[in-house]
Image (cartoon, coloured by chain):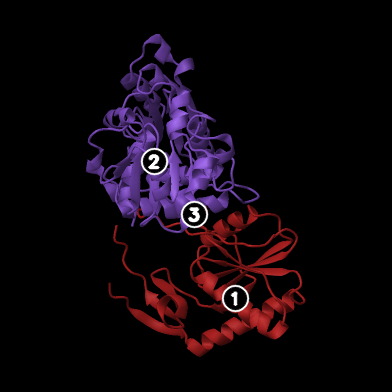
Chain colours: A purple, B red
Amino acid sequence: MPLQQKHLLGLEGVSAEDISLILDTATTFREILDRPIPKVPTLRGLTVVNLFYEASTRTRISFELAEKRLSADSVNFTTSTSSVKKGETLKDTIRNIEAMKIDMVVVRHQAAGVPRFLTQCVDAAIINAGDGMHEHPTQALLDMFTLREKFAKLQGLRVAIIGDISHSRVAGSNIRGLKAMGAEVMLCGPKTLIPRDVEKFGVQVTYDVEDAIAWADVLNVLRIQLERQEAGLFPTLREYHAEFGITQQRLERAKKDITIMHPGPINRGVELDADVADAEYSVILNQVTNGVAVRMAVLYLLSGNEESVS
Amino acid sequence: MEIKVKAKVIDQEGLQRTISRLALEIVERNHGVANIAIVGVRTRGAFIAERVVKRIQETEKHKVPFGILDITLYRDDFRKRLRQPLVQVTDIPFEINDIHVILVDDVLFTGRTSRAALDALMDFGRPSSIQLAVLVDRGHRELPIHADYIGKAIPTSIGEEVQVRLMETDGEDCVLLVEAPKEVN
């Protein structure tokens, strides 16, 4: 069964079968990364543009490596060095880039919905690398891949997502993906950072981090964006750390094995203590390695099946 | 879809004998098993390779490294195929540098699969040599590739197809000559 999507705009509406196919394919690609020559000729002749309107280290490098490992040609576009500075519109930029014969676009943008908008402008397959506060599907896929690697299955797994849920596209995609795969999800954070209508996703909510730790097998700790404090959504970083920070002490009190994830970049000492981030039960660096394999799987699966979808 | 069988070219016992002979030839040509490894091409090549390894280990009382190669990502028709093939894991749990690798496949036809397998194998290192063993050679090569060990050479016409059926995948052991199904697309 090929992938039932032409683009990857988000995990909303993506079936468990499709998610499983991506994760299974990623398992194959994970093995390639350990080879003496970690490269296969599969996507030779395919050109991918990485269109990044927003700062990114991990995701951009990860996509770029994934493209190179599959032998695709890739071109990078960052706003700081492009004609966007001269006032070119998004639609003009993308149509000009497509006129140079490209097959796929990886896009990150500060506005939600940009990837979907691009699908109406060009024929190329679009992959969302994070759009505003909407979705970041490859991050959620690599999180699920990492969990499946550790726990063998996602069904019934208890995942607590801790932090700024309202503004997090990582949370947005993880909730949808994990629910589709049959995992249980709990959200935890300050009231001001949890959306009011969130129960419609079938998740639990708690405002006490100790409750979340007691309940969960896995903590996916989100980054606290410093500009949220300026907006007055929580008093100080110190207070956030005191109320919601994941510390060794809190974990020890729970008296059980727990797995720690973080999408990066970490604010050490704010949402996550340094010794927790570096502990042996933290899979943060596995997430990064697996990210390349998962993105290879997405590129591969979206590259070959135009006929089967339309 | 109904497939018209023209002949049973190898039966169950014949298949066992053929695999035994392939195993013996591999040992003979390499003067033992000290420096060899067997790698099967997914899907049926891997099962044939596994049987060859078993046979060799029975006679030689010596362990032979065994690996499985998935060549999907190296195919030259990848971008042309309508249905995207499912990629499976390659599993070569040993160093292939400076050893003789015997690549095992079920049917040698155009040679394109073997070409892809050679490329895939080379990405794992630099073996002393690569030898090719196939259960059936049906001719019609499109690339300059030949097999070092051939179970059975079956002259075929282009409208025919050779089907290797194995217990592990198809519930029976035999090789059939069938009329090629008409292209659907």
Q: Which residue has dot 2 on it? A: A161
Q: Position of residue A173 (x, y in %)?
A: 35, 40
Q: CA distance from mark 2 to mark 3?
A: 19 Å
Q: Position of residue A71 (x, y in %)?
A: 53, 42
Which residue corresponds to the image point at 42% horizontal and 80% vertical from the top-left?
B176
Disc 3 + disc 1, Cβ < 8 Å: no
Whole-percent x, y for residue B74 in the image: 52, 53
Let me know if marks 3 and 1 both belong to one chain. no
Residue A149: mark in rendering:
3
Three-letter amino acid code of the residue under disc 2: Ile
Sequence-first tag of 2 and 3: 3
Quadrant (top left, top right, bottom left, bottom right) of the C terminus of chain B: bottom left
Q: Chain of mark 2?
A: A
Regarding residue B142, the answer to whether it shows in the image is no
Q: Residue furthest front?
A: A253
Mark in front: 3 vs 1: 3
The spot of residue B80 in percent (x, y) is 40, 50
Q: Residue at x 38, y 23 (%)?
A: A234
- Residue B123 in view in this figure: yes
Disc 1: which residue? B150
Label 3 element class: helix
Check disc 3 and give the amino acid type: Glu
Label 2 or label 1, whichever lies nearer to me, is: 2
The relative height of residue A4 versus residue A276 in the rendered view (above or below) is below
Q: Chain of mark 3?
A: A
Q: Chain of mark 1?
A: B
Looking at the image, is mark 2 or mark 3 nearer the viewer?
A: 2
Left or right of B118, for residue A28: left
Instruction: Name the residue located 53 percent from the left edge and 33 percent from the top edge.
Output: A61
